[in-house]
Image (cartoon, grey):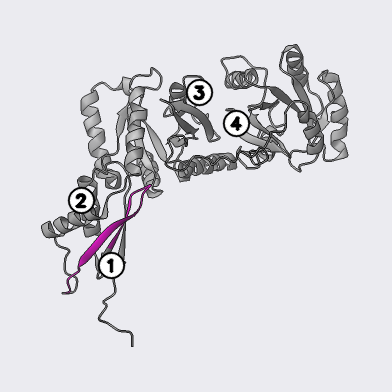
């Protein structure tokens, strides 16, 4: 698909235009310059034009080793893959020296460039619009990304580069998309964890390129970035998320937006890889993140990153397993994958673990087998009598998967102790090999057919 890359200085409105073209608030937008750090792709649309739109970090003239220089390299990689660059300037600020510098580089390149003078919703921006002619990149397009003005002129400019697609219904070729169980449907995986645990480094190692911005600074990732790729022929959508800190330590609007964006990505995913720093694994925040994922009913794999720094790997892994099963019994048996994202050691075991836990998350168990198990479980450990009255467990059936969910019909659902429900869930997990995924058990009272309403 045609790829349009939006470039320009920080805080000229690139992410605002990206969201407008994508039709969704995908990119974080704030008045703070330099909010966007990693490039983000989305499906853009303008009237009948469809294309891939890419949001990039702000262009700054800085040394390569600095954060701004690494951000610029990410933008340069996006430009190398582009079919067309949309160079944005802030019309209210006019053409700056940085704008002129990068315009000179764009004129020497082989990629076609359009100039958009943003923030032209008032007369204050028109002076900057006319100044943009001196950039030597053709006629600038006056727009207002925030208010949606000037998109008709942008459409006319894009129309000379992008062909209008022929619809399947117009060509008589309607095709249904892949269903939920199709191997062609992308598997959605989110990588979450505390700041500076190596999430972006792990993403780069998995996809085999420097797709995400990395460095020694904590909290580099702000947006939740979706990357489409394939593993052994299986399409995957991989979400890199911002580091999650304790709620009390979150300060500022931008960090709150990043946290909310990360949580949305985790809710949207099917499998969440919780990345931990193996040298200080299973701190309280690590357990909180894993518990939050389990409460949302997502399949979980725990990646113990920086494993190359551990001196006694076998003893340390046994300690980690014991602590996890004790602290989070609701996901007992969750896969633990020791690895080093920096060196690549152990990373090859991560996706097979994801595939296995995803299959368990989707598993369905026949009702006959469930009720045979229920009879054996109640025979070994009958439900307790409450207030001198016996509780009868009559019937159990699976009512859903993703995660596995079960309905248990009983005479007195409200009276069944929580401890006995945990006994049943642990029995289900052991009997049907449901290790590492959250389970749901819903108690339903069955009315007495011999009691009539008065």
Mark 3 or 2, nearer chain start: 3
Distance from disc 2 to disc 4, alpha carbons, whole Å, reads 45 Å
Circle 1 packing at 10 Å, graded few (<14), some (14-19), many (20+), is some
Single out the mark in the foreground, 3 or 1. Answer: 1
Single out the residue that lies furthest toward the left.
380
Residue range (magenta): 389-408
Mark 4 or 1, nearer chain start: 4
Circle 2 packing at 10 Å, graded few (<14), some (14-19), many (20+), is some
**SS type, badge 1:** helix
**SS type, badge 2:** helix
Mark 2 or 1, nearer chain start: 1
Q: Which mark is residue 41?
A: 4
| Quadrant of the drawing holding the C terminus | bottom left
Distance from disc 3 to disc 2, alpha carbons, whole Å, reads 44 Å
Looking at the image, residue 42 sits to the left or right of residue 276; the answer is right
Looking at the image, residue 195 sits to the left or right of residue 317; the answer is right
Q: Is residue 400 magenta?
A: yes
Q: Which residue is mark 2?
A: 427
Distance from disc 3 to disc 1, alpha carbons, whole Å, reads 52 Å
Q: Which mark is residue 413?
A: 1
Distance from disc 4 to disc 1, alpha carbons, whole Å, reads 49 Å
Which residue: 58% across, 18% down?
Answer: 66
Q: Is residue 364 visible?
A: yes
Single out the residue that lies furthest toward the top.
108
Mark 2 or 4, nearer chain start: 4
From what the image shows, is residue 314 above or below residue 450?
A: above
From what the image shows, is residue 193 above or below residue 85?
A: below
Q: Which mark is residue 214?
A: 3
**SS type, badge 4:** strand
């Amino acid at each position: 698909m045609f790829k349009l890359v939006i470039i320009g200085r920080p805080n000229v409105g690139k992410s605002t235009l990206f969201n407008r073209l994508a039709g969704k608030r995908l990119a974080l937008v704030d008045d703070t310059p330099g909010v966007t750090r990693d490039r983000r792709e989305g499906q853009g649309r303008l009237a009948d034009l469809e294309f891939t739109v890419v949001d990039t970090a702000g262009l700054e003239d800085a040394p390569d080793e600095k954060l701004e220089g690494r951000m610029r390299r990410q933008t340069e990689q996006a430009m190398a893959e582009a079919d067309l660059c949309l160079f944005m300037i802030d019309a209210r600020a006019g053409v700056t020296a940085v704008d002129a510098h990068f315009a000179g580089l764009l004129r020497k390149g082989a990629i076609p460039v359009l100039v958009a003078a943003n923030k032209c919703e008032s007369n204050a921006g028109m002076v900057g619009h006319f100044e943009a002619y001196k950039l030597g990149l053709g006629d600038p397009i006056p727009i207002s990304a925030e208010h949606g003005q000037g998109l008709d002129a942008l459409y006319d400019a894009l129309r000379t580069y992008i062909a209008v697609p022929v619809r399947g219904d117009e060509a008589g070729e309607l095709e249904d998309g892949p269903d939920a169980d199709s191997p062609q449907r992308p598997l959605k995986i989110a990588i979450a964890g505390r700041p500076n645990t190596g999430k972006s480094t792990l993403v780069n190692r998995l996809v085999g390129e420097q797709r995400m911005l990395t460095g020694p600074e904590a909290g580099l990732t702000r947006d939740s970035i979706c990357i489409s790729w394939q593993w052994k022929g299986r399409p995957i959508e991989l979400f890199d998320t911002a580091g999650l800190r304790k709620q009390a330590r979150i300060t500022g609007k931008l960090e709150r937006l990043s946290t909310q964006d990360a949580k949305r990505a985790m809710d949207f995913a099917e499998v969440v890889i919780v990345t931990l720093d193996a040298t200080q694994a299973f701190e309280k925040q690590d357990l909180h993140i894993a518990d939050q994922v389990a409460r949302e009913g997502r399949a979980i794999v725990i990646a113990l990153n920086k494993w190359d720094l551990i001196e006694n790997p076998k003893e340390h892994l046994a300690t980690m397993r014991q602590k996890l099963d004790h602290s989070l019994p609701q996901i007992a048996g969750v896969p633990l994958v020791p690895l080093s994202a920096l060196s690549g050691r152990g990373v090859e075991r991560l996706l097979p673990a994801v595939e296995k836990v995803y299959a368990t998350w989707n598993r369905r168990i026949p009702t006959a087998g469930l009720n045979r198990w229920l009879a054996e479980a109640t025979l070994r450990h009958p439900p307790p009598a409450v207030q001198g009255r016996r509780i009868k467990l009559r019937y159990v059936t699976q009512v859903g998967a993703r995660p596995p969910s079960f309905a248990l019909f009983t005479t007195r659902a409200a009276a069944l102790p929580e401890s006995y429900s945990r006994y049943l869930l642990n029995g289900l997990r052991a009997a049907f090999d449901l290790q590492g995924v959250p389970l749901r058990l819903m108690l339903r009272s069955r009315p007495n057919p011999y009691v009539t309403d008065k």
